[in-house]
Image (tube, helix red, strand yellow):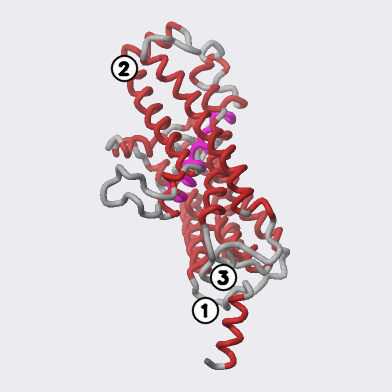
Amino acid sequence: MSQAAEHLSARVKDGAPRPERGRFNRTALIGYAAFLALLLYGLAHAYWASGGDGFPFGADDANPEYSAFQNVGRDQLAPWIAGWFLGSAVVALLLALPGRRRIPTGVLVGASLLSAAVVFFTLADFRILGNLAYVFMLKFSAINWTVINQLFAVVSVGLMVVSAVVYQRRTSGACTRCGRSDTESGWTSRESAARWGKRAAYTAVVVPLLYASTRWAWALGFPLGISNELWEEGKKDHLWIAGAALATMGALGSLLTLGLVQRWGEVFPRWMVGLRGRRVPMLLAIIPATLVSIMVTIAGVMYIRLHFQGAFDNQKDDWGATVPEMVWPVWGLALGAATLAYYFRRRGVCKRCARG
């Protein structure tokens, strides 16, 4: 073994990160993908601002009553959104390029988080979650142009946030793959994550069950939290049966959250023929849990926003139709925390920095 190879081997054994292999590594590609997506979407809005057809938001929304910009037309809204996405594209490029910027890391990371928050809580709404349910029910016709644009916007800023996390790790000396450093905090240890992750997981199970209980009550003939008139109206259209079916899907999904803190979330149980005894791939749990946590948080914030906009002022006797959804951000944040704890518990020894 050469002297250089021996030196590298010693660094890995000591927990130091391996050097990056080339500029276009996988973590860097995330940043460039974010830049490209944000740039293209900014240019699309510039096209709409100049009079192009197909603007999906505000007063042009297929359902403007759900939009945070319900009464704002394309001429006023499109230029602002174009500028926002083009500015976000610049931030994404700064995060993706190799080396360190003169701009403080906190400013770049904060800008990416702000951009994501604006998209999540103004452009996106509960229709993303609702359309996911329709996809599982094979009702693809319910997906419209606005929802497609919401998904693209959410994915674009989501990639930028991931790139910001990688940049923060890179500039702080942490491993860009696992995030560990020589001064790692105790709350990320397996033991600590097991404790706070269990509390988060149980919270993420209880909240959606509270919501589902109202929908099950309506389907069984009990107008819990709504007036008799509204219940009779929904009964004629079989609305409560459909609502109970969707609530049941959500409840079953919430029970799967227990897999983040139970053994069957790490090793396939015996009844799963062909898979029993095998380790559950981490991403099989992390990806869907992360997506659901984002979507239910977006939906819950939308209901809170509509409440402050006065959309429910005429429904004070029908609290069961709106109040349970306002608690969804608790569900989303708890599920996100439980997913993060699951990652901390299962990440094992990093293949790049050899920390574990």
On the image, the x and y values in percent for residue 170 come to 63, 68
Disc nearer the start of the sequence (1/3): 1
Disc 3 crowd rating (10 Å Cα; few below 14, some 14-19, many 20+) is some
* Cα separation between marks 3 and 2: 57 Å
Q: Nearer the viewer, mark 1 or mark 3?
A: 3
Instruction: Provide the secondary structure element on which disc 1 rests.
Output: loop
Residue beneath label 1, please?
A: 21
Amino acid at circle 1? Arg
- Read off the magenta span: 286-305
Q: Quadrant of residue 185?
A: bottom right
Disc nearer the start of the sequence (2/1): 1
- Specify whether residue 71 is in view: no
Residue beneath label 2, please?
A: 238
Disc 2 crowd rating (10 Å Cα; few below 14, some 14-19, many 20+) is few
On the image, the x and y values in percent for residue 109 come to 65, 57
Q: How many numbered dots are placed on residues in this image?
A: 3
On the image, the x and y values in percent for residue 304 come to 58, 29
Instruction: Provide the secondary structure element on which disc 3 rests.
Output: loop
Disc nearer the start of the sequence (3/2): 2
Residue beneath label 3, please?
A: 354
Amino acid at circle 3? Ala
**Residue 91 or 24: which is nearer the viewer?**
24
Instruction: Provide the secondary structure element on which disc 2 rests.
Output: loop
Q: Quadrant of residue 63?
A: top left
